[in-house]
Image (cartoon, rainbow, N blue to C red):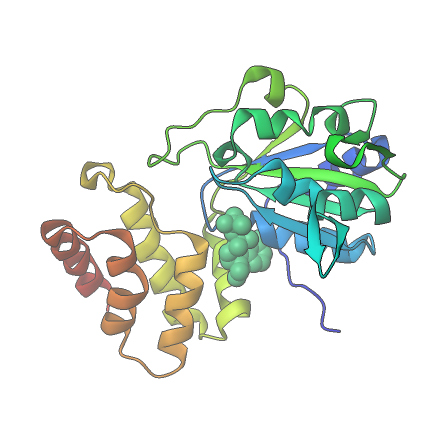
Amino acid sequence: MSKVFYKPIDQEVEVLLASYKLKLPLLLKGPTGCGKSRFVEAMAEKLKLKMYTVACNDETSAADLLGRYLVKGSETIWQDGPVTTAVRNGGILYLDEIAEAREDIISVLHSLSDHRRELYIDRHNETLSAPDDFMMIVSFNPGYQQSFKEMKPSTRQRFISLAFDYPEFDVETEIIQIESGLDLNKTKTLVKLSNNIRKLDELGLAETVSTRLIVGTAKLINNGLHPRLACDVGMVQSLSDDLETSRALKDLVSLSF
Ligand SMILES: Nc1ncnc2c1ncn2[C@@H]1O[C@H](COP(=O)(O)OP(=O)(O)O)[C@@H](O)[C@H]1O
Ligand SMILES: [Mg+2]
């Protein structure tokens, strides 16, 4: 099995290890594509824990998380949801974009996220205690403008909070090189260009260039696509559907490549 590549940006590894040891749940906040999921994958591997990821949205139900009865022929059988499986078996439960889930769904997890570390499954009339090797991690994107969703303070204060952001120039350059195989010079040009786009507040982009977008674009360039075309399909078109905005972004690209 190949090792998950993760380049630490700050002291997140130390914080996660301490939280795991102390059995405190962790909240990762930061923009999309900045390495939150990759970080959890790498830490799960390091701690030799299985990782259970649940992508939350406004239709996520308690049954999606905890489990449901299924009809099979003449029988009804209980099927654990991912949260229940993680609590039964141990491992890292990663609830991605937790703020997208409804508040009443989040509250189902309250007893799991405090000192009780218990999960009550009312439909199945069962209470599970989390084993020592269970850890709950959630992610939250505070700048996500489409949703305007916030987390209630009563929920937020259950977690140790780690703020993520795009890495500084040298670190991001190294990440892009390793992830894409692109040569150092072109990678530096691409990361510089991305940082210039990130500075452009006046474009009013909902989200700016993420490390993920740079990785994808770098892979396209490394695969022989012309850098301008790669930047257009890998970045510009992903950032905006507005003609004028994409023209401004393309102008910026053409100054670099
Ligand atoms: N610190 C990092 N180390 C290694 N790869 C990273 C790092 N940060 C970002 N990446 C790259 O960016 C991509 C997107 O990161 P991801 O963890 O999926 O973002 P998020 O979960 O924050 O939306 C990853 O697939 C990886 O290629
Ligand atoms: Mg993610």
Quarter of image, res 31: top left
Q: Residue at the far left: name it.
A: 244
Front in this rendered view, residue 195 or 32: 32
Is residue 29 toward the left or the right of residue 224 in the image? Answer: right
Front in this rendered view, residue 61 or 140: 61
Front in this rendered view, residue 156 or 251: 156
Q: Is residue 87 visible?
A: yes
Residue located 52% across and 24% down the image? 151
Quarter of image, res 26: top right
Q: Position of residue 161 (x, y in %)?
A: 62, 29
Quarter of image, res 38: bottom right
Q: Which image quarter is the C terminus in?
A: bottom left
Residue located 30% across and 60% down the image? 235
Q: How many marks?
A: 0
Does 234 appear above or below 78? below
Front in this rendered view, residue 51 or 251: 51
Does 64 appear above or below 179? above
Is residue 98 toward the left or the right of residue 239 in the image? Answer: right
Q: Position of residue 203 (x, y in %)?
A: 19, 41
Residue located 24% across and 37% down the image? 201
Q: Position of residue 224 (x, y in %)?
A: 34, 84
Q: Position of residue 73 (x, y in %)?
A: 72, 61
